[in-house]
Amino acid sequence: MRAVITVIGKDMVGILAQIAASCAKHGINVLEVTQSILQDLFAMIMLVDITKSDATVAALSEEFDSLGAEMGLSIHVMHEDVFNSMHRI
Amino acid sequence: MINTKDILETIRMFDDENLDVRTITMGISLLDCIDPNVEASCRKVYDKICGFAEHLVQTGEDISREYGIPIVNKRISVTPIAILAGANPAASPVHFARALDKAAKTVGVNFIGGYSALVQKGFGPGDYALIESIPEALSETEFVCSSVNVGSTKAGINMDAVKKMGRVIRETAERTADRDCIGAAKLVVFCNAPEDNPFMAGAFHGVSEGDCVINVGVSGPGVVRAAIAKASPADDLSAIAELIKRTAFKITRMGQLVAREASKRLSVPFGIVDLSLAPTPAVGDSVADILEGMGVGQCGGYGTTAALALLNDAVKKGGVMASSHVGGLSGAFIPVSEDAGMVRAAKSGALSLEKLEAMTAVCSVGLDMIVVPGDVPAEVLSGMIADEAAIGMVNSKTTAVRVIPAIGKKVGDELNFGGLLGSGPVMNVNRVSPKAFIDRGGRIPAPLQSLKN
């Protein structure tokens, strides 16, 4: 099962490192990362494999919510199917 | 990998534009709960609902968390209770309302629909008693919603039922006057009522439906409004219709995903996705804002009906390809108190009841969540119902009346229902009496377009 993690907010040192560390902690394999910085706005999208994760999407979502609040970023974890069903026929 | 732009668009829809799945509604047949002993019947009703819907709320919350999609309401619709009440017409059907209310409380849903009667052609054994009991049932219960179908394109309009319903609406409001007349907000009078509608207050589980089914109602006026706001002023209305279609497609696909998942997890067949634009009082989540975004100066001005017709049609065209089964009401709702833009237009005088009636000829339902003065006589309400039913009957579409007489209040005052029901100003009503017309009773014959065979 794959999920998409999106991170949006003000650019700062260590965003990718923090998110990746959380993923590693739960046994989540990062498949693809794209990131862009427009002026000061940081936007990162990460496609991850959560098949072997020890946490559910719901639990991850809660964990990233609090991490996002600490770092002043908006972090979402969503099931890949949401994007596939909305944007692909 | 999925396109970055698409991913950010989806996140924005959820975060900023109030996209949600409005309701997962489980339809449950109560035909096997019919029993001449009312107490036994109520026990069967309670047990069946609690058994089938035991995991409904939890499943909805699980899907919401796992997919990151807000699912606002979990609800139940049941077989029209008049059919069960018919087994013992002497007993009060309010027993059933109490059983439904108790079951709703036990399983944790926020509404249960189906305290209903289908009387478009005549009254069956339980219909009279059920209709007469509506004021008591809605004032005594918290979660029960009621609907009565008084007309259809095939059957014509039952004017005896229309007459009754004017009085029943007033009585329901009177009995709940201490709670902002909330009872009347849970009562809908239909023409051409759909049997698989997941939205309240008009949801019921039709007799031709299966034993149990999952129907999903999607929403998303905020998303459509945001899409139109990004359109260039040079875009013509064909381009606007295309934009709405594309947006409706995406919204409906999300609904289909949730419906499929809920159906699988609950081991209940998937019924339909209702692709309605259902506004909420939240700023920006408004159908009126969409119409104004298209260029109508203010909702209610000339051009509003045409803009709404375009919107309603484009929503259906976009959504229909996104789901394997589309049903329910499907289109754009125009409930006044639930839509901040409509409330604004009604308060400023731009939106009148007469204009709303015209809009119901092209929207997906009818006169919805409209607060009228408390002293409007029952026959005027019946006249209003008759006119709405006539629009539905002749145009082969669903129409409905959900008006709330604000007991003790006059034009300019306000009723506040709270939550998704919102608050609405008391609107002016044409008081010319249709009493002689309504008192004639009988049936308005089905129109020529009913003879299709």
Image (cartoon, helix red, strand yellow):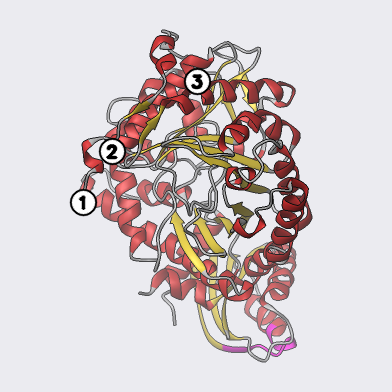
What element does badge 2 sit on?
A: helix
Judging from the image, mark 3 belongs to the subunit labelled B
**Location of residue B436 in the rendering, given as x and y in whole percent from the top left corner:** 40, 10
Q: Are marks 2 and 3 in contact (CB under 8 Å)?
A: no
The tag earlier along the polypeptide, 3 or 1, is: 3
Report the quarter where the N terminus of chain B lies: bottom left
Q: Mark 3 against mark 1, which lies toward the viewer?
A: 1
Q: What residue is disc 3 on?
A: B347
Give the quarter of the image for residue B305.
top left
Distance of label 3 from label 1 (alpha carbons) = 47 Å
Membership of B158 in magenta stretch = no
In this rendering, is residue B158 above or below B438? below
Q: What residue is disc 2 on?
A: B395
In this rendering, is residue B21 above or below B408? below
- Identify which residue is drawn at 55% across, 64% down: B213
In this rendering, is residue B248 above or below B262? above
**Location of residue B95 in the rendering, given as x and y in whole percent from the top left corner:** 74, 41
Q: Nearer the viewer, residue A31 or B262?
A: B262
Give the quarter of the image for residue A10.
bottom right
What element does badge 3 sit on?
A: helix
Membership of A27 in magenta stretch = yes
What element does badge 1 sit on?
A: loop
Q: Is residue B352 visible?
A: no
Q: Is residue B336 visible?
A: yes
> Marks 3 and 1: same chain?
yes
Distance of label 2 from label 3 (alpha carbons) = 30 Å
**Location of residue B98 in the rendering, given as x and y in whole percent from the top left corner:** 75, 43
Q: What residue is disc 1 on?
A: B453
- Callout 1: 10 Å neighbours few (<14), some, many (20+)? few
Q: Which residues are magenta?
A: A23-30
The tag earlier along the polypeptide, 2 or 1, is: 2
